Image (cartoon, rainbow, N blue to C red):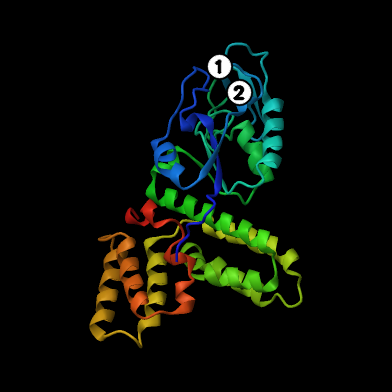
Amino acid sequence: MSSERPNKPKIAISACLLGAEVRYNAGHKNSRLCSEVLRDYFDFVPVCPEVAIGLGIPREPIRLVGDAHQPRAIGTVDAQLDVTQPLADYGHRMANELADICGYIFMQKSPSCGLERVKLYHPRGHVQDGGTRGIYARAFCDRHPDLPVEEDGRLNDPVLRENFLTRVFAYSAWQELLRNGLSRRSLTDFHARYKYQLMAHNPVQYKALGKLLGDMGTTDARELGPRYFSALMTALKQCATRGTHSNVLQHLSGYFKQSISREDKQEIQHVIGQYRQGIVPLVVPLTLLKHHLRHHPDPYIAQQVYLQPHPENLSLRNAI
């Protein structure tokens, strides 16, 4: 029921978010969440693509100009400064070098690292609507479409933070499975452990993935595995809601219908109802269900990742 592992998962991160003074103005954007909280649970790999391609500290700022799908990274003072290709090349290089990471936290709004809504300018200087993605981030993410990625600012939202870290630990668990050897048995066992986690995030994909494995037939697990995992990560990217969480809690409570008293059943239903209405956070009904699980063990339920998809001390479910 614990997601803690002896080896901490690796997460790449924009170096400025860990306090490194690498920004264009020789400053940083230290994130207390990353540098003081998450650092205890992950091995961070700091990266600053602008410094890595040879831009100095301090340096002339760059901005994105032109087409949203193929912007150019141009100097804000010297229009002849064009670092588009070096940033893209470095993104491809790091995508190869950082093959063992389980997630990436990018600096928001950065012309190199921003994931979305980065300011995009017309050649004559006016800001375009919609924005775009940073050059380095685009090149890196194109090579790792299943990797959990997020911007630092969005991690201040407790739902998005819990979702991102759930995906990071799922990615780490899959890497561990691959290291131990992917087989038909290990694939079906992995899916069994993620059953209720999937149901909470995306009930439709939960059924589709179950059918995918059910129809596996003689298909080689090494062929099916990547398709399964890609679909899994897409499903987990959808944030669970109070409604879908409540549905999973109801399913879990059903395992105790023959083993607990009528009063205990009523208490469980009352607490799940309170959670659905937004009166209590998710940790409250989960704590009650875990209490009954300790007294009435069920091996199938005990293995469910949903009960503890990330280290308990992160307290992520206290805020959702």
Q: Which one is earlier in the sequence, the residue at label 2 or at label 1? A: 2
- The three-letter amino acid code for the residue at tag 1 is Ile
Q: Amino acid at mark 2?
A: Val
Position of 141 compared to 241: left or right?
right
The vertical placement of 222 against 7, above or below, is below
Which residue is disc 1 drawn over?
57
Q: Residue 286, relative to residue 82: is it above or below? A: below
Between the residue at mark 2 and the residue at mark 1, the CA separation in whole angstroms equals 8 Å
Residues 286 and 246: in front is 286
Which secondary structure, mark 2?
A: helix
At a point 57% along the width and 55% down the height, the residue shown is: 172
Q: Quadrant of the N terminus?
A: bottom left
Q: Residue furthest top?
A: 78
Q: Which mark is residue 51?
A: 2
Q: Are marks 2 and 1 in contact (CB under 8 Å)?
A: yes
Quadrant (top left/top right/bottom left/bottom right) for the C terminus: bottom left
Q: Can you tell which mark lies on residue 141?
A: none
Q: Which x, y percent locates residue 176?
A: 61, 58
Q: Position of residue 55 (x, y in %)?
A: 62, 18
Mark 1 element type: loop
Question: Residue at 49% across / 18% down in the picture?
Answer: 26
Image position, residue 64 (x, y; %): 60, 25
Out of 186 and 236, give the one closest to the viewer: 186
